[in-house]
Image: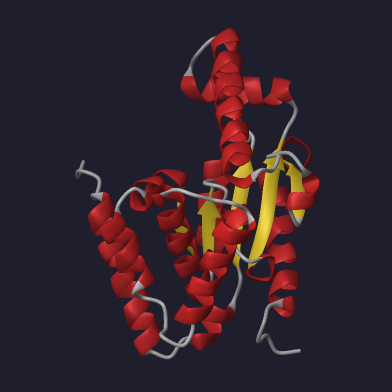
Amino acid sequence: MTAPRSIDKLIEDQVRRWELSRRDHAAECRRDPVISISRLPGCNGRALAQELARQLKFDFFGADLLHQVAESSHLSEAVLRTVDEKALPAVEEWIKSLFLGRYLSGNYLHHLSKVLMAISAHGRAVILGRGAGFILKPECCLRVLLVAPLEDRIQAVAARDAIPPEEAKRRIVHTESDRRAYIRRHFHAELLDPVCYDLVLNTTALGSEGTLAAIQTAWEGKRKQAPGAAK
């Protein structure tokens, strides 16, 4: 087993790919919207998001990576520098409007906004968690929420982590409470408010294949409506 790459190395590699893409004039890729995935714990959200990125050949950005990059000013600035100079003023203006209009504050949220806007400027990415759908421009992001009945989520977590159902329920309730609090604190919104999303999917009812197919169909529709898309 090789040791996992550091966050710095992951970002360094991603920055290099973006720079190569820009030199290859892949403007059509950068125009395409990104997909943000919010989820209730126990919905298999991470695995679904990663599989979605694999099927679409998109970049994948997990919540843990985004969190660590947002806590590092030099990493967030490195990501922002990959944005085309012509697009940079619009990115900075949107970030400014977020902090003025929604009363967001703090270095963490500022760095996170920079990173997410840079990812959005490049397009074709799946972003898991961190409230990405509450930060990015709605026209440039397909905002998805994954849900499932509590009992199904308890069974899934118990099987995945090999723990009793009671412990699985405790973990789910704790994690869900944290996620709800994060969205309320930073975005003055509710995690489960359907108005905040383009698509709300019950992963139990649809299954993995149905969930992924629904997201891809919705993304194609969003793509046709994206700024600069061919009509």
Q: Nearer the viewer, residue 99 or 41?
A: 99
Compared across the picture, whether 157 is left or right of 60 comes to right
Picture quarter with the N terminus: top left
- Residue drawn at x 69%, y 70% is 139
Residue found at x 26% / y 64%: 12
Left or right: 220, with 123 as reference point? right
Along the line of sight, the residue nearer the viewer: 64 or 157 = 64
Is 15 on the left-hand or right-hand side of 101?
left
Regarding residue 44, the answer to whether it shows in the image is no
Specify the farthest residue to the left: 2
Q: Is residue 90 above or below residue 152?
A: below
The x, y position of residue 43, in whole percent, is 63, 35
Q: Position of residue 56 (x, y in %)?
A: 56, 66
Q: Compared to 140, does 84 lie above or below?
A: below
Looking at the image, how many numbered discs can be counted on the residues? Answer: 0
Nearer the observer, 27 or 90: 90
- Residue found at x 66% / y 45%: 208
Name which quarter of the figure residue 33 lies in.
bottom right
Compared to residue 93, the image places residue 22 above or below, namely below
Give percent across and percent down for residue 220. 71, 71
Confirm whether residue 60 shows in the render: yes
Q: Which colour scheme is used?
A: secondary structure
Q: Is residue 218 above or below residue 129?
A: below
In the drawing, does residue 9 fall left or right of residue 107? left
Instruction: In this rendered view, identify the residue nearer to me: 101 or 66.
Output: 101
Quadrant, the C terminus? bottom right
Residue 100: percent from left, percent from top: 58, 60
